[in-house]
Amino acid sequence: MDIGQAGVWTRMDGFSVAEAIEFAQRVEELGYGALWIPDAFGRDPFAHAALLFQHTKKLVIATGVVNIHLREAQATACAQRELHDQSGGRFLLGLGVSHQTAVEPLFGKAYPAPLPSMREYLDKMDNAMWWGPELDGDPPVILAALGPLMLKFAAERTLGAHPFFAPPENTRRSREIMGEGAWLCPEQKVLLESDPEKARARARQAMAGPLTMPNYRKNLMRAGFSEAELDDGGADRVIDAVVAWGDEDALVERFEQHRDAGATHVCIQPLDIDDPARPSLTTLERLAPRLVGG
């Protein structure tokens, strides 16, 4: 599987089916190697990936990420293998353990220890029944890893790690923990807006949810931010570290910071300055000539 050095991470819940197909095709035309889609409370990522595979030729569709507490491992394993077969090996399954503040109130069950639960889940997937055809190669898995234990496990057991909501310093630390062989595919929010007040207001809007989630907060504190800086919408220093804003040069510089820190592939999340529900295709079009080569 070749996903190149740049991909796109975005929610597509607000798109019609036709718009989603057109967007995926445009991402492919621009040369981005992968389109990463989340698993939350909108479009089902497996069903949506199947649709997009029908209308693209080489684009990798990756989940960023499937919540292991939402699905039994047997069901996930069969969906993964089916999509691997359908797409000719273009499906990358990203898995994550979510957060205590999401799992307990929403799903009505205790949040288990992250690493043991992920290990058990992968064991069950490996041993899942599959009555489909023999597959060409092993379907790949990548983990939403932030802490040192999960990062080490990701490098040992899977293709690597897909950190979310983390600055380049996290990429550098993650690479040191994981070693040179594993894939490291951080998500990076970008905003093509040079006015500081407008940019930070939009960035805070995008960061409001994640800043309340314990795993992301702990990880930002590992990167050197105080807990106080994460409260009340986030201090400017936190906002600027998590969301790259400014002109094209500023956004490309942040991309290169991740690459210099050891990223294999950077997942660009292009925020739209006016519409929180949709990605900015204009941003992707303007950045593509400088990001997808090499």
Image (cartoon, rainbow, N blue to C red):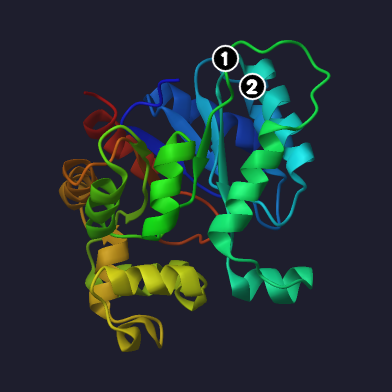
Q: Is residue 83 above or below residue 284?
A: above
In percent of the image, x 40 and y 40: which residue is there? 155
Q: Quadrant of the C terminus?
A: top left
The structure residue drawn at horizontal position 57% and vertical position 46%, both measured from the top left corner, is: 95
Hey, which quadrant is residue 139 in on the image? top right
| Amino acid type at image mark 2 | His
Q: What distance separates the C-alpha of mark 1 from that of mark 2?
A: 9 Å
User: 63 or 173: which is nearer to us?
Assistant: 173
Helix, strand or loop under label 1: loop
- The amino acid beneath tag 1 is Gly
Residue 156 in the image: x percent, y percent? Answer: 42, 39
Query: Which tag is nearer the camera, tag 1 or tag 2?
Result: 1
Measured as percent of width and height from the top left, residue 100 is found at 61, 72
Q: Quadrant of the N terminus?
A: top left
Q: Residue at x 62, y 37 (%)?
A: 19
Give left or right: position of 264 versus 275. Answer: left
Say which residue appears at 31% left-offset and 45% top-offset: 178
Give the label on residue 84, or none: 2
Taking depth in this image into account, of 68 and 9 the one nearest to the observer is 68
Considering only vertical position in the picture, is 93 above or below 28? below
Mark closest to the chain's N terminus, 1 or 2 = 2
Q: Are marks 1 and 2 in contact (CB under 8 Å)?
A: yes
Q: Position of residue 172 (x, y in %)?
A: 22, 52
Report helix, strand or loop for mark 2: helix
Q: Quadrant of residue 76?
A: top right
Residue 137 marker:
1
292 relative to 274 in the view: left or right: left
| Residue 13 x %, y % | 65, 50
> Above or below — where is 100 with respect to 272?
below
Crowding around mark 2 (Cα neighbors within 10 Å: few <14, some 14 to 19, many 20+) is many
